[in-house]
Image (cartoon, rainbow, N blue to C red):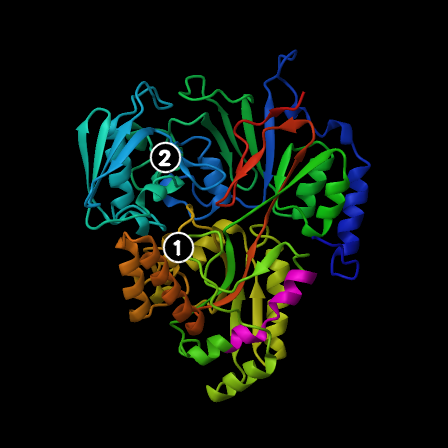
Amino acid sequence: MLLHHKGSPGFGRRAAILAVAASLLLAACGGGGGGGEGSSAPAEFRIAIGIDPDTLDPAGQTTTTVQNIVDYMVDTLVDIDKDGKLKPGLATDWEVAPDGLSITLTLRQGVTFHDGTPFNAEAVKFSLDRVLDPNVTVPIRGSYTVIQEVEVVDDYTVRLHLSQPSPALMAALSTTMVGIISPASVEEHGNTYTNYQHPVGTGPYVFKEYVPGERVVVEKNPDYWGEEPYYDRVIFQVVPEAATRMSQLLSGQVDMIILPPVSDIPSLQQNPNVEVLLAPSNRTIYIAINNNDEVLSDKRVRQALNYAVDKDAIIQNVLFGAATKLDAPMAPSLFGYCPVGAYEYNPDRARQLLAEADVENLTLDFIAPTGRYVQDFQAAEAIAGYLEDVGINVTLRTMDWPTYVQNIQQPPDQNDLDLHLLGWAPGYLDAQQQMVQFQLAAHPPNGLATAFYTNPEVEDLLERASREIDVETRADLYCQASRLIMDDAPWIFLWYQSFPIVYSKDVTGVSYLPNEMFDAVYARPAN
């Protein structure tokens, strides 16, 4: 249960914002931005998000908020439902060979890209080959490198030849990174093969406009192959401050927001003008520790950082209960999860480990985003305070999301960050994509394993798990790896968060997916 804590920092400011906002034009809070039946104006649906996109290239995606935008324009071969189960997308059927070394996909016919060119097997081959091309920046490529060849069997049949069995690959094909784009579009709209910022897919909406720091606008695709959405236009407004997002919703300036101030969720739940959806999430929140640093490469120091932070207190007093402490290097919703034990708050143990490592007067550079995760910078401030309590000097900074991503993705020889706060939400409910965070092959610039951690025993367990067909054996391999990872402490293991979505009561059809994505393509006026 989420509770108000009136003594918490920022309560008065948020309460004041809520009071002012609630007195505004609540009646204007719905209706999908005007338009629709009986109006000549186009029907608009406005969504306030916390960050600016760092890229609109499907292959370059690193975070679910931006993936949500791209998914309005670009379809994948398969999709997942609210339970994480696969369903057809651009592929209507698929068959895995008995030896697990190939997958044959039957493609949907009669589909066209937004530029009028046909969707077919050649387009699938082009898109997948591009994801596998080392010349293209694909931070989350690891799940797909098992694909050795994409064979065009005929216009509407594709066969994927694999280097080894990959039980998680079909689920991986549901993620934005392998969204299918028009091959012709890489030479249009200012796009290039390696710098692709105007997505042209087969999705229900067409790219219209991107104003950095302000908004992304998409318009309805009149030739969409699937169910027609209601709204003519969807506007994603970039609003970093959670309190501002909330006030915009309450005053009718937007129709839906994600990540409101968590301290105000109880008040929002009582507000008759809005609906609150507390969606489950598989996102783990953690502090990535630079395992390449001379001091931080000592496991005792990394363990000390874990013992120094009172995660329970931060969850209760800063996140207002909107998270659960990690007892494994992944969320419980993933296949392969097993509880291996959390780092409990023990500042004396932290000081003892620092002394054993002969560490004194340690100074750490710590960066954290604002507006990307639940109470992200506020939590970072509390974490910095706990580290200072055990004698560590901390310099904490924030920055806009595109700059943040650019900083953490620097290769090891150019990366001097000590600590950074990050969240990781696998695109499908399997430990495989979570565990890429602990593999050498995913170290920047090849991936987003930004802690630069590797352990040969862990690498072996994960490699075996990635090709293991037997379900119980595969789960046990991930459990063994989890125990080693938690002991090695490459992160400060924090929590997995909930995913609050708030929308006008005059709107219906808003839902969620289990990989921390909102599902509002088919939102429409409630009346």
In front here: 515 or 469?
A: 469
Q: Is residue 316 visible?
A: yes
Mark 1: amino acid: Ala
Which of the 4 quarters of the picture holds residue 296?
Answer: bottom left
**In the image, what residue occupies the spot 65% across and 13% down?**
39
- Distance, label 2 to label 1, CA atoms, is 19 Å
Residue range highlighted in magenta:
304-317
**In the image, what residue occupies the spot 27% across and 60% down?**
464
Residue 230: image location, x then y, percent: 55, 21
Q: Is residue 187 visible?
A: no
- Rendered position, 424 above or below 36: below
**What residue is disc 1 on?**
431
**In the image, what residue occupies the spot 46% across and 67% down?**
417
Which of the 4 quarters of the picture holds residue 409?
Answer: bottom left
How many marks can you see? 2
User: Magenta stretch mostly in which secondary structure?
Assistant: helix
* Cβ atoms at labels 2 and 1 below 8 Å apart: no
Mark 2: amino acid: Val
In front here: 115 or 158?
A: 158
State the mark number for residue 78.
2
In front here: 281 or 76?
A: 281
Residue 350: image location, x then y, percent: 55, 80
Residue 447: image location, x then y, percent: 35, 55
Q: Nearer the N terminus, badge 2 or badge 1?
A: 2
SS of the residue under disc 2: strand
SS of the residue under disc 1: helix
